[in-house]
């Protein structure tokens, strides 16, 4: 019999890449969607898997819907990707962010504890939990947390609940502490996609400028398609554990901008970029750089797509979209 997986956040960026991977491995994939008048399947369409996923309704804010789903499905694996994932919005919507990102995973953990204790659980933890902290310029599994946003704080709660339910009840729960990962279906508000979308529009004469915030922030950017493999691998191990996942390379937003303009043959990018304070944050995370030795050694995972390839892939996809 084929294995079953419940994936929350199925309509986001990572959900479709993970669904694609699990379907190729023969899983039956249940995707959680909230009630919508018009759900948006465009990211699943991009990967060509819209009709292969079984959709189930529920909401991370609605405990009963999650309890009921776990009770009915008894999935072999649960991947909790759903979140209010935009850091900037979490400053204005701290309560909502906490409810979805902290209490949502708690509801799922309780549902597993009561109704399906053999289900393995993956929690989408994040490098944002490190915030200001680093160990000699890197972050790894031993680096302490110092979150800098309501988003980061909400994810620290979920991280520890995931650890606690493993330690208290012997559940198979794993945290993937993922650094930034991007793709052509990255949400348009996030800086990489905002840049590649803007660059494509400028190239095609559809826009004259690109308005951005802090160009000095540095991130460890990888490709989402690579990172979902690490999520899957974490749930295939004999013992549950927590892993940092990243490339080990850090680039500034400025470098991303430069690379994106360069990929369309423009070197004087400064002519097009306007610094706009509305895109700056009350507190910033200045530098994220993963030391992902554990995931490489224990799971044999490594990224396949380089920074330059990622930028080019995203710019090309946006040019193609507008070209149409
Ligand atoms: P994303 O594109 O923002 O997708 C998040 C998904 O969560 C969306 O599909 C959204 O559904 C769903 N969601 C939000 N609130 C919900 C609710 N109340 N009930 C049910 N579903 C809800 O995020 P992503 O980039 O794929 O990231 C996946 C996960 O990894 C997130 O938890 C994120 O915090 C975490 N993470 C991401 C990165 C990264 O660089 N991408 C790095 C580390 C960790 P709708 O489509 O209905 O809005
Ligand atoms: N979004 C955005 N828009 N960010 C900008 C802009 C802008 O116009 N200008 C500069 N930035 C800077 C932000 O201040 C931040 O330092 C950096 O670009 C990256 O911002 P985002 O792409 O919004 O991502 P993030 O790093 O805050 O959060 C993402 O990665 C986390 C993992 O580290 C999200 O995917 C989170 O959900 C994820 O946990």
Image: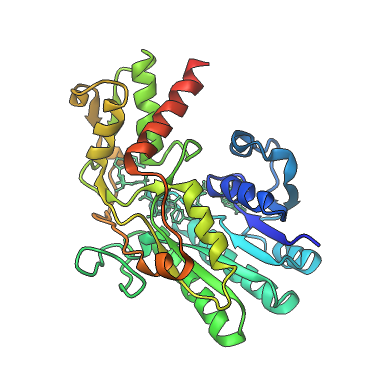
Nearest to the observer: residue 129 or residue 28? 28
Q: Position of residue 303 (x, y in %)?
A: 41, 52
Quarter holding residue 111 = bottom right
Q: Residue furthest top?
A: 205
Question: How many labels sit on residues?
Answer: 0
For the point 72% across and 54% down, the residue is 26
Q: Name the residue: 56% across, 45% down.
A: 12
Does residue 57 appear left or right of residue 165 in this picture?
Answer: right
Query: Where's residue 3, x and y in %?
Result: 74, 62
Is residue 53 shown above or below 71?
A: above
Residue 321, compared with residue 149, is above or below; it is above
Can you see residue 213? no
Q: Residue at x 35, y 67 (%)?
A: 293
- Give the vertical position of 32 relative to 321 (above or below): below
Q: Position of residue 267 (x, y in %)?
A: 20, 24
State the quadrant of the N terminus: bottom right
> In which quadrant of the rendered view does residue 62 lie?
bottom right
Picture coordinates of residue 87, whole percent (x, y): 39, 51
Q: Is residue 123 visible?
A: yes
Colour treatment of the image? rainbow
Q: Residue at x 57, y 66 (%)?
A: 122
Furthest residue in direction bottom, as rendered: 168
Left or right: 7 in relation to 290: right
């Amino acid at each position: 019999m084929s294995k079953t997986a419940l994936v929350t956040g199925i309509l986001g960026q990572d959900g479709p890449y993970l669904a694609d991977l699990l379907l190729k491995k023969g899983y039956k994939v249940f995707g959680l969607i909230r009630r919508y008048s018009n759900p948006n399947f465009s990211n699943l369409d991009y990967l060509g898997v819209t009709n292969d996923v079984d959709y189930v309704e529920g909401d991370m804010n609605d405990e009963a819907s999650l309890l009921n789903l776990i009770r009915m499905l008894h999935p072999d694996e649960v991947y909790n990707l759903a979140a209010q994932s935009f850091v900037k919005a979490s400053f204005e919507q701290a309560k909502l962010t906490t409810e979805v990102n902290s209490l949502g995973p708690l509801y799922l953990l309780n549902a597993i504890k009561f109704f399906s204790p053999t289900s393995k659980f993956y929690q989408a933890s994040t490098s944002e939990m490190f915030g200001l902290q680093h160990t000699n310029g890197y972050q790894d599994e031993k680096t302490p947390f110092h979150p800098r946003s309501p988003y980061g704080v909400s994810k620290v709660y979920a991280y520890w609940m995931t650890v606690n339910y493993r330690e208290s009840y012997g559940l198979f729960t794993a945290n993937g502490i993922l650094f930034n990962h991007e793709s052509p279906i990255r949400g348009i508000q996030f800086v990489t996609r905002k840049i590649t979308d803007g660059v494509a529009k400028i190239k095609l004469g559809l826009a004259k400028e690109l308005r951005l915030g802090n160009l000095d922030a540095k991130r460890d950017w990888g490709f989402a398609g690579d990172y979902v493999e690490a999520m899957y691998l974490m749930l295939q191990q004999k013992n549950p554990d927590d892993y940092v996942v990243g490339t080990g390379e850090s680039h500034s937003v400025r470098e991303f901008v430069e690379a994106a303009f360069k990929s369309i043959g423009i070197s004087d990018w400064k002519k097009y970029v306007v610094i706009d304070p509305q895109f700056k944050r009350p507190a910033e995370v200045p530098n994220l750089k993963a030391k992902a030795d554990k995931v490489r050694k224990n799971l044999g995972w490594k990224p396949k797509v380089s920074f330059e390839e990622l930028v080019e892939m995203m710019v090309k996809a946006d040019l193609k979209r507008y070209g149409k």
